[in-house]
Amino acid sequence: MPWKITEPMTEKEQFITLARTGRYTISELCKDYGISRKTGHKYLKRYKELGFSGLKERSRRPAGSPWATSDRVEKLILLERKKHETWGPKKIRDRLLKEHGVERPPNESTIGSILNRHGLTKKRKRKPGVHRVLPDHLTVPTRPNEVWTFDFKGWFSLGDGMRCDPLTVCDRFTRYLVGCKGQPNQQFKGTLSTCKKLMRYHGLPEIIRVDNGTPFASMALGGLSQLSVWWIEQGIRVEFIRPSSPQENGSHERMHRDLKAEAIRPPSANLAAQQKRFDRWRNEYNHDRPHESLDMLRPAEIYHPSARRLGEKDKMRYPEGYQIKRVSDSGHITCRASNFYLSEIYSGCRIGLFENLEGVTELHYANLHLGNLEFGSKDTWRPKALVIAPNQSPRKAK
């Protein structure tokens, strides 16, 4: 039966006071207060040792436990969390096992409790909604260098006021971060230069997946840009995610969140200093950080450079029956004495023309159906014919 609290003294103090008078036996007092003789003698002993302060409730926690986390291991857990602020219990446990030689590291829930006890955790509120599987129009990679994802992390201002646009390139199968380059803008020339450097070192992927923003896409025919046309000319297939659907490139977006937390906040003084931080973080991401999707392996343990080298491309081939046209420097082609404007981004490219069973001339570039040719336009100030999008009715030039 628990002790009842009365004022001005507790029942425990009353019990001790009455026991000291000698007028009552311990058995009588224990019966009156509804406690056992063992409990009564326990509190008499505590009073003799510590006085009335010894009557306070004590913790029932065992004095020791053979399974308790040692101070050394707990310090290692806190050290790893300090070095890697975005790492959770799974990654820290793997680090203890493989890097620090802890034979029996604490389980993930224990590590989480230690982090929580030291105020190093933060609850996240999950956004409600349905998590959709990868759409059918996107390739699920089964080997390294099958699919690379390109994207720009949102720009930010450096300490000197200059703009920094981080361009990130990731191998989707191994999660290997192929490149992380801080650029002053998102323009074509700088992006192409970075792309060439990465491909000279790592080789060519089979597919590049991008969003619908610049410099990857444009309003030109087919939605391609000068950069994506250059990729196709190297024998690389280009995949676009659906507009306003970043979840279709989820692993890349997740990597961006860690990049922002660990290598951008706060920004560096200038672009050179910021690039050094990017390089250090990329090395850590590839060689030190275990990934749950890889069974806690590091990306560098799986990734290897591509055997396809930059400059070793085959001539683009079209099926038999296609008429091949080369686009002029001004972005035009001629067919049946008619002039068609495509776009300057296709300058020098080989285009395939195919007349289908309905008598419509289709315009193809690589594996893309860019549109159909419309003949007979009478506007002398514009090209003598138009290219119309697939599944769109012909219309005359204005």
Image (cartoon, helix red, strand yellow):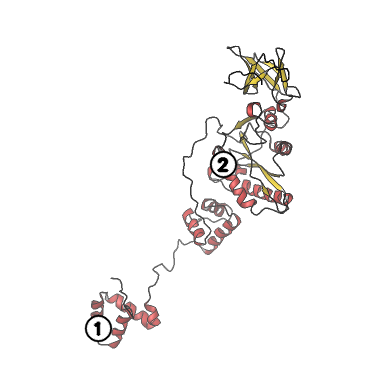
Q: Residue at x 70, y 24 (%)?
A: 314
Q: Which mark is residue 251?
A: 2
Using a 10 Å C-alpha cutoff, classify the residue at mark 1 as few (fewer than 14 neighbours), some (14 to 19) or many (20 or more).
few
Q: Amino acid at mark 2?
A: Ser
Q: In this rendering, does residue 326 appear at all?
A: no
Q: In this rendering, does residue 237 appear at all?
A: yes
Residue 54, compared with residue 309, is above or below; it is below
Residue 195 location (% of width, % of height): 70, 37
The residue under label 1 is: 25
Q: Secondary structure at mark 1?
A: loop
Foreground tag (1 vs 2): 2
Residue 166 location (% of width, % of height): 67, 44
* Count of numbered labels shown in the rendering: 2
| Residue closer to the observer: 263 or 384 | 384
Q: Earlier in the sequence, mark 1 or mark 2?
A: 1
Residue 141 location (% of width, % of height): 57, 34
Residue 74, compared with residue 202, is above or below; it is below
Residue 41, compared with residue 325, is above or below; it is below
Q: Amino acid at mark 1?
A: Thr
Q: Judge left or right: residue 310 versus residue 38.
A: right
